[in-house]
């Protein structure tokens, strides 16, 4: 019984025993589960800490987060050779950057104790970026497609990638990429179908293609501006480039993922096709290979050791070549004589040189030590050319023929012949023997652009004064070579006592003016033979009359300026060939049909005249649209021509203009690190259609632009003049005809890579350094390899890197020249000969 009881009792306790075991097992499993969960959580926490430590001890992460809060939509960028973006702050924002640095420091300290907030703040940054009030809905959608792809890369590098989010983000990136590829295919289909339609429809589709490309350009340039703004703040806060390098890499990926850079689009337009990934990859590989040689290069800069010192102009101060001249009767010694080897030395600064006075105040005064010459004060001071005012040189606005001021003289010409119509019919003019260019300087008041030129002669530093004042001018002489301008481009030519013997040798020099003067244009001659009666003046006037009649020029009016006691004769060039055909004597003769009037570079003067174009499709047969309409409207004579990039010239003209307006508005004017208030004299080293200068004008940037068309580029200079701008031909393997420190900004768009193949690129950069003012800017747009090389050279010159960016084989670089000069001198060559020649030519 007992046993039975015991047996029954044990049987009743079995369920309790099983429950206890089950609970124990369950608790064990729970403990194991908790242990497993804890083991998975700890690495995540550690990884967050590792990320924060890698990115400059969490401080940089918070700094970037702060910047997104202050400037939503910004993308941080930091420098890296060949694939980087940096921007140095302007000096006037330094105080603000100090306050920002304190705020960032306080937030960084708080962040160091709250590592878990890193992930959440990263998400906030992305949301802030997408909600940028400056973006359109379409732009925000595109940014959302790009950003997750970059976050995925960041998580992969940190070892914390979530598989679900990774798939979603990758899909978003693929969708965006497919959309871009689809848009490319659509563009290609439109291009291929264009040939099946008439010319009008083809033009419309070409413009549609340009519009779609410009849409991508707009987005890209907008992103550059955002990146630049953030980079400026980041640099101002004093953060090191090394500490934020990894953050920078993620930001670059944000910007680049599934987008086409604006420079790439432009290059593709030239090539007539879009770049492929294979091509872009090859560019990157070549860049990586070349970076080794670029980094290892050393540039041994030396100061030029010449008798002209800080005013050295290589092609005009080549005394060895000048000494060998057989004659100087036709001013051969004032013409270009470039050295056999391009100069690679750097020109020194005048003692006491300082940043030029800004326009428009500079029109009235300049720093004396920037151009320390007083000879013109002595010989022309009574005519109000220039006066000595201690630390300044002042310019009352007078001239030999207008000592009471240029404005009165300009009004006098207008009243004498109202058809001249300053700033409407007459927009681009040539001023021969300009002096200090006060005539051109005050014509800005009439919205007239004046190409002023004069030789480097006994009128000491006259062109240097003009450029220092912020007035367009160049060095040149009417001697044995054609002027470096196309035919029939100037609306008016002016000469006020310009010391040119127009009447000699059958009017050979006057015939050169006839070549560059537009049919129906005016020649204003204000000189003593017009109004004085001494024997010499009477003889010159008589000879001038005979020559102008034989040239079929009409003497429209002779007007007297009572205030200045002078007079001016105004002639008009014919608009047809009737007079030429009816001449009794063929003197001066008509030029051979094989003689191209537009060929001007190093071409000898010809004592002949070219017939006036009369066909309605020929350039020069119709006067251009009145200013400012002519700036934007394609010239009538390019409608049937193919453009530089293979499309219709009129389409390219419009696209080029629109392109540069977008680029300037979205990046150049706001995010390149350029202080535009200090910029007045600008040069476009490869102008093409002049779209860069036209866009600056349209956006009301108070500058003038010297548009240069290289001699081995398509001859688009006539188009530039037709739209109311001006420019010049030049060979960039040689020195430019200007004084040192002439320009505030040089723009080199897709030219330096070409020059590397034919010139000494070191000499080209030395020339850029020569003509660029200290604190002036050089903007380079070219392939990535060239960008890297120029950046390396700029650093060796101690220039400041304002912006550098390159990707997919294309790049952009903005650098600022400093006051640095080397201490070593280059060897001087035959200095005794130089002095002897200068003494011999002193009065010529």
Image: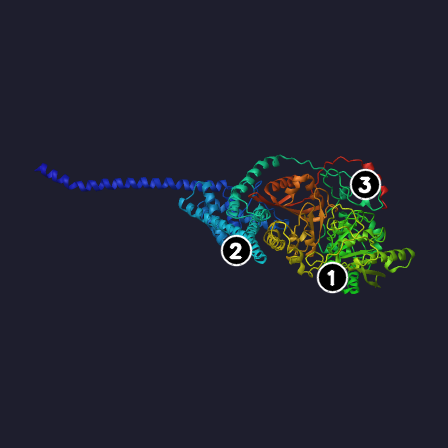
**Label 3 neighbourhood size at 10 Å, few (<14), some (14-19), many (20+)?**
many
Task: Tell me where residue 278 appears, x and y as whole percent.
Answer: 52, 41
Q: Position of residue 165 (x, y in %)?
A: 42, 47
Report the front residue among 96 and 312.
312
Q: Earlier in the sequence, mark 3 or mark 1?
A: 3
Q: Which mark is residue 422?
A: 1
User: Can you give x and y, in whole percent of width and height, for residue 414 in the image?
Assistant: 77, 63
Q: Residue furthest left?
A: 1
Which type of secondary structure does the marked residue at label 3 adopt?
helix
Q: Residue at x 85, y 53 (%)?
A: 503
Q: What residue does disc 3 label?
A: 322
Mark 2 → mark 3, Cα distance in angstroms: 61 Å
Pick the residue in front: 423 or 805: 423
Q: Nearer the viewer, residue 814 or 521?
A: 521
270 relative position to 548: left or right: left
Q: Is residue 829 left or right of residue 718?
A: right
Within 10 Å of disc 1 (Cα), the crowding (few <14, some 14-19, many 20+) is many
Q: CA distance from mark 3 to mark 1?
A: 41 Å
């Amino acid at each position: 019984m007992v046993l039975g009881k015991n047996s029954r009792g044990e049987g009743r306790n079995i369920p309790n025993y099983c429950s206890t075991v089950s609970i124990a097992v369950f608790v064990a499993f729970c403990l194991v589960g908790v242990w497993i969960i804890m083991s998975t959580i700890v690495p995540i926490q550690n990884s967050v800490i590792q990320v924060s430590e890698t990115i400059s001890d969490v401080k940089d992460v918070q700094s970037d987060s702060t910047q997104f809060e202050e400037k939503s939509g910004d993308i941080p960028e930091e420098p890296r050779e060949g694939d980087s973006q940096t921007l140095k702050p302007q000096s006037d924002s330094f105080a603000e950057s100090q306050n920002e640095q304190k705020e960032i420091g306080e937030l960084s300290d708080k962040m160091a104790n709250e590592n878990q907030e890193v992930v959440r703040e990263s998400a906030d940054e992305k949301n802030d970026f997408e909600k940028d009030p400056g973006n359109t809905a379409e732009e925000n959608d595109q940014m959302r497609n790009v950003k997750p792809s970059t976050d995925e890369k960041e998580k992969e590098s940190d070892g914390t990638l979530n598989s679900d989010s990774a798939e979603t983000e990758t899909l978003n990136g693929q969708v965006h990429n497919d959309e871009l590829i689809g848009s490319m295919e659509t563009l290609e289909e439109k291009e291929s179908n264009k040939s099946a339609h008439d010319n009008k429809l083809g033009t419309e589709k070409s413009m549609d293609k340009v519009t779609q490309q410009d849409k991508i350009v707009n987005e890209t340039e907008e992103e550059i501006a955002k990146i630049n703004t953030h980079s400026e703040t980041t640099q101002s806060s004093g953060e090191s480039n090394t500490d934020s390098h990894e953050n920078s890499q993620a930001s670059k990926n944000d910007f680049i993922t599934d987008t086409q850079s604006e420079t790439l689009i432009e290059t593709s337009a030239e090539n007539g096709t879009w770049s492929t990934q294979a091509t872009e990859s090859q560019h990157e590989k070549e860049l990586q290979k070349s970076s080794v040689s670029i980094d290892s290069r050393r540039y041994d800069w030396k100061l030029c050791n010449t008798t002209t010192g800080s005013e050295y102009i290589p092609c005009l101060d080549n005394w060895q070549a000048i000494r060998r001249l057989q004659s100087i009767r036709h001013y051969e010694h004032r013409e270009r004589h470039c050295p056999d080897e391009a100069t690679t030395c750097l020109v020194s600064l005048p003692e006491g040189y300082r940043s030029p006075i800004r326009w428009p105040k500079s029109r009235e005064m300049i720093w004396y030590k920037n151009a320390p010459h007083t000879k013109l004060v002595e010989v022309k001071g009574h005519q109000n050319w220039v006066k000595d005012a201690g630390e300044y040189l002042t310019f009352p606005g007078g001239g030999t023929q207008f000592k009471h001021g240029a404005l009165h003289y300009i009004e006098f010409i207008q009243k004498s012949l109202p058809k001249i119509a300053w700033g409407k019919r007459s927009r681009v003019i040539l001023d021969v023997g300009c002096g200090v260019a006060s005539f051109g300087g005050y014509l800005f008041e009439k919205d007239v652009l004046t190409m002023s030129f004069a030789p480097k002669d006994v009128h000491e530093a006259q062109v240097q004064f003009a450029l220092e004042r912020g007035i367009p001018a160049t060095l040149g002489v009417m001697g044995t070579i054609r002027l470096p301008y196309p035919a029939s481009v100037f609306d008016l030519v002016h000469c006020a006592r310009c010391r040119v013997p127009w009447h000699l040798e059958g009017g050979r020099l006057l015939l050169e003016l006839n070549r560059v003067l537009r049919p129906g244009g005016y020649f204003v001659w204000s000189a003593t033979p017009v109004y004085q009666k001494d024997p010499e003046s009477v003889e010159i006037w008589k000879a001038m009359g005979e020559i102008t009649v034989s040239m079929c020029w009409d003497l429209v009016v002779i007007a007297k300026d009572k205030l200045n006691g002078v007079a001016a004769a105004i002639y008009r060039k014919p608009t047809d060939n009737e007079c030429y055909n009816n001449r009794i004597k063929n003197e001066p003769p008509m030029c051979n049909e094989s003689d191209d009037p537009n060929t001007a570079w190093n071409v000898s003067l010809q004592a002949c005249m070219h017939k006036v174009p009369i066909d309605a499709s020929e350039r020069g047969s119709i006067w251009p649209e009145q200013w400012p309409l002519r700036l934007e409207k394609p010239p009538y004579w390019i409608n049937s021509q193919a453009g530089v990039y293979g499309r219709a010239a009129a389409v390219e003209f419009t696209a080029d203009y629109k392109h540069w307006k977008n680029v300037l508005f979205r990046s150049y004017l706001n995010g390149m690190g350029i202080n535009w208030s200090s910029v007045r004299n600008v040069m476009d080293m490869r102008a093409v259609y002049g779209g860069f200068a036209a866009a600056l004008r349209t956006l009301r940037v108070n500058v003038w632009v010297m548009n240069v068309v290289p001699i081995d580029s398509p001859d688009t200079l006539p188009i530039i003049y037709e739209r109311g701008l001006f420019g010049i031909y030049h060979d960039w393997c040689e020195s430019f005809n200007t004084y040192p420190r002439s320009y505030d900004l040089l723009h080199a768009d897709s030219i330096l890579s070409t020059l590397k193949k034919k010139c000494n690129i070191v000499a080209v950069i030395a020339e850029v350094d020569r003509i660029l003012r200290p604190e002036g800017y050089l903007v380079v747009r070219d392939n990535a390899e060239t960008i890297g090389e120029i950046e390396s050279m700029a650093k060796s010159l101690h220039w400041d890197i304002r912006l550098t960016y390159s990707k997919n084989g294309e790049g952009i670089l903005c650098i600022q020249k400093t006051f640095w000069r080397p201490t070593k001198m280059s060897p001087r060559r035959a200095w005794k000969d130089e002095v002897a020649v200068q003494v011999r030519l002193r009065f010529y």
